[in-house]
Image: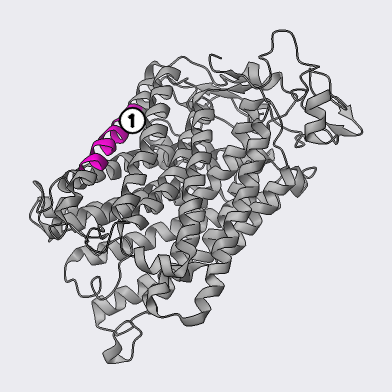
Amino acid sequence: MSAESVDDHGVEDHEHGVDDHEHSPTGWRRWLFTTSHKDVGIIYMWLTIFWFIVAGAAAMLFRTELLTPGDGPFFNLLGYNSLVTLHGLTMIFLAAVPAGGIFANYFLPLYLGLDEMAFPRLNALSGWLVFWGGIMLWWPVVGNLLGLTGLPFNGGWFAYPPLATRMSTVSVDTYVFAMFILGISTTVAGINFMVTLLNEREPELGMFDLPLGAWGLGIFTPILGLYELPWFMVGVSFDFFQHAFGMGFFDARTGGGPLLWQWLFWLFGHPEVYFVAMPFLAIAGEIIPRFSERPVYGYRAVIYAITGITIMSGMVWAHHMYVTGLGQIRYLYMFFSMAIPIAFIVYIFSLIGTMWRGRIHLKTPMLFSIGMILMLIFSGMDGIIMSQAPVDVLVHSTYFIVGHFHFTLFGVAIMGFFAAVYYYYPKMTGRMYSERLGKVHASLTIVTAPIVFTLMDELGTGTSHTMMMRRYATYTYAPQLQGLHTWTTAFAYVLGFAQVVFAANLLWSLRYGERNENPWADLLDGQGMPSPEWNGLPYKPPTPSVVPFRQGVADGAGSAEADGGVETDGVETDGGVSDTDAPDEAVPDGEVNADE
């Protein structure tokens, strides 16, 4: 492993074979000119956290607007639409998408035994493009406040024509160019990650020797990005050409196709959901075994399941278009939409099997990993409901879709992001966060998020006269919805407060946190499960005993010694499965160690 030190600002100087930065830029020049994969990962982290807080603040504002059926206290109708649009675009393209880039940049080389990415300069470019894409997207807000431009883009994060193409403000252009910048960033990053994994990894690492984190960050996520983004870039180009030059790509009067944008957008938009969740599905497969003191149960089954999810995610986009008159072919999309949950069930049961009768340590990363699984179950149940064409047609334009979308984007991608940040933050910064504040953040988020999103589901499932329609700034047509909106906003405030705790914890810890690069050293070192990003190579994924799982737990048959790493019938075990071999001080099977 390379030498590492901590600078005066509490951020690690991770060198590659040298102990100082004599010949490297320092201060702001270090970050501006860096090609270090670790520095780029840290840039991604702080940009992601900043834009996540900005997007969350926007959500709090428009939730306040919805406390009353009529116009709210802050914005007119177009201002409300701009705020909702910026919230969606920021949370997806500036928070959820680059969140995976944090850990791919910083840890993928460590997973693979490398000093650097395949293309270090391309890597640095991808990080700074996130910065400039955010500036471009939010610039009309500054221009509007200064009286220089009209309203920010208010065509929705989906930018459906004809609304988006008939706007005359500069914000349409800034939206288009921001999407191009961010799309290029994601594309070049994905190419870099995949080439690094396939071409640069240590020779002794076969594909099935890789950690789940490496599979997720270096294979599945780049595949999804390289598949989905070209559709979106083509659609955005058509949008711009129609807006700027009057080309009628989406105008039936000039020979265009009114549904063309929807086909292009949802070829991107549905795989995008899995794209932002994929890094954290994989990282949870690293965290849960560590804090359960057991190897992942069904390593190859998880890989095959995620492979199925990756393939099928590109085959179900048209279930967003049931209301456009697809005809009988919609049943094909129903089939694949219902098949994806089967693959997710394999993933969920694998991680539950990993935790089963393990010695669970309820540290903050583990809490959020468990919370992510719970939210994935909520999201999956909603998804099964919406895969049915008759039900989807009924609720398609209601808040039920908003609730489901948030269960997936926030509940899986963002909560997985929290788990990964808490797990790896000490290694990335050299400082330990406050575990107490981390648990406050986890408790408030895990409890309130499903309440908020379930209330959104409820808002969209009333009678035809009481459904809350999505993209509506008012609900004067159904004032009886005010009670549900009030409760939704109240719990959203609590959820928002929890994210303030998260940001404050990380910022405080950056300067005042205990210097500790590996707070999990005692836990990891005693497990007999090598973890390359912490311990270096060589790495082989440990597997449970070949003895049937229940039998091995029940009677100790074929169990390994408690110190780990002992082979049984040629298969390595972790030493934490059998209760007959557990040390005296171990927590009894089935109990949870919440204090460690």
- Nearer to me, 73 or 33: 73
- Nearer to me, 203 or 50: 50
Looking at the rendered structure, the kind of residue marked 1 is Ala
- Nearer to me, 376 or 287: 376
Q: Residue at x 32, y 55 (%)?
A: 89
Q: Quadrant of the C terminus?
A: top right
**x and y, in percent, of residue 256 in the image:** 34, 87
**x and y, in percent, of residue 459 in the image:** 28, 52
**x and y, in percent, of residue 93 in the image:** 38, 53
**x and y, in percent, of residue 466 in the image:** 23, 58
Q: Residue at x 63, y 54 (%)?
A: 343
Left or right relative to 336: residue 60: left
- Identify the residue under disc 1: 498
Residue 315 makes an appearance in the image: no
Q: Secondary structure at mark 1?
A: helix
Which residues are the magenta region?
A: 486-501
Quarter occupied by residue 156: bottom left
Left or right relative to 182: residue 542: right
Residue located farthest toward the top when viewing the structure as drawn: 584
Q: Main secondary structure of the magenta part?
A: helix
